[in-house]
Amino acid sequence: MILYINTVLPNFVEEKVKSISDFEVRENDVWVVGYPRSGMTWIQEIVYLVQTLDFEGSRSIDCDERIPYLEFPTSTLTDLSEKPSPRIIKTHLPLKLLPTQIQTIQPKMVYIARNPKDVVVSYFHLVSSIQSLTRYKGKLEDFVDSFLVDRVPYSPWSTHVLEFWEIKDQPNVLFLTYEDLQKDLEGSIRKVAAFLEKDLKNEDVQKIVKHCSFDEMKTNPSVNHQWLTDRQFQDPKKAEFLRKGKVGDWKNYLSKEQDDKLNVKIALKLKHCGLFFHYTE
Ligand code: A3P
């Protein structure tokens, strides 16, 4: 991991992060941003379908091809700059590390946030399931401790979320939470459609709802990062990219002590900002 402008970044970002700042942004781009394990794959799929209604492509073309992951080595910035408009771009980078043109061009940006207790549990399962890639050998308690002191990739979580929370009222920003999506998927899809200025027919909205349900997405190979298993980075028996898809799964993993520590940290970081999360379904 590297520390860059007060952000912990995975090593693979090191080469790219400086050039990302000069990356050319287009007015009709849609940027999907969030801290890892916050429901990025879910919201990406919603954005893609609202934008394109390409249900077939959504099952047959890998999501990383449809929605390139800005800082990941599988997509180069040149490929991305040659991609025809309208582009949908995914990134876990915090607002301050996004291309500088984000501020001037102001493309549409959808930010997804999730309660940090489910984030940390989900994140631990992912990094330990792709150990040959992440080299992470710690236990859950180690990971929670690292999360608490902002030492896991893309941390600090609170800064990541709050930087976007502060600009949530800008017309080019839609701030959603994982818990919103769980509570009212149809309503959230309609919000995304209104934000992207897409006048969808009711039957299309219903198709997106069905397509983006946990069960449907779990059986959709294009969003399950099959290449991780194919290239033997992920043990197929150990964990899946789409794991449980619940609000409150943290209760099955975190001890009272860990919960208390997280509560203290959350209260400290989110005080007076008006952002609240749901921690149970
Ligand atoms: P869990 O590990 O708690 O199951 P990201 O895409 O940002 O990495 O986030 C992954 C988390 O979002 C995982 O959480 C995954 O199961 C959940 N997720 C993805 N698609 C979902 C869907 N359609 N419904 C509910 N949860 C979903």
Image (cartoon, grey):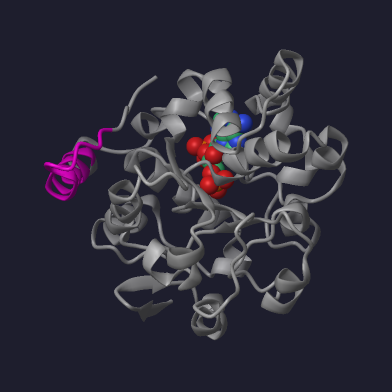
Give 239 or 36, whichever is nearer the viewer.
36
Location of residue 204 with respect to 263 vertically, above or below: above
Location of residue 161 with respect to 81 vertically, above or below: above
Location of residue 196 with respect to 156 vertically, above or below: above
User: Which residue lies at the image location 12% right of the left edge and 41% below the top edge?
Assistant: 272
Give 242 or 18, whichever is nearer the viewer.
18
Q: From the viewer's perspective, is 276 left or right of 1?
A: left
User: Which residue lies at the image location 58% right of the left edge and 27% below the top edge?
Assistant: 189
Tell me where residue 52 sits by quadrant.
top right
What is the quadrant of the N terminus in the image? bottom left
Magenta span of residues:
259-276
Q: Can residue 272 be seen in this view?
A: yes
User: Which residue lies at the image location 73% right of the left edge and 18% below the top edge?
Assistant: 201
Location of residue 219 with respect to 41 vertically, above or below: above
User: Which residue lies at the image location 35% right of the left edge and 23% below the top edge?
Assistant: 280
Tell me if residue 272 is in the magenta stretch.
yes
Q: What secondary structure is the magenta-colored segment mainly? A: helix
Quadrant containing ligand 1: top right
Residue 166 drawn at (x, y percent): 28, 50
Give 96 or 142, whichever is nearer the viewer.
96
Residue 113 drawn at (x, y percent): 41, 43
Give 58 or 164, whichever is nearer the viewer.
164
Q: From the viewer's perspective, is 272 left or right of 77?
A: left
Tell me if residue 207 is in the magenta stretch.
no
Q: From the viewer's perspective, is 267 left or right of 224?
A: left
Residue 242 drawn at (x, y percent): 62, 39
Q: From the viewer's perspective, is 32 left or right of 257?
A: right
Q: Is residue 99 visible?
A: no
What is the quadrant of the C terminus in the image? top left
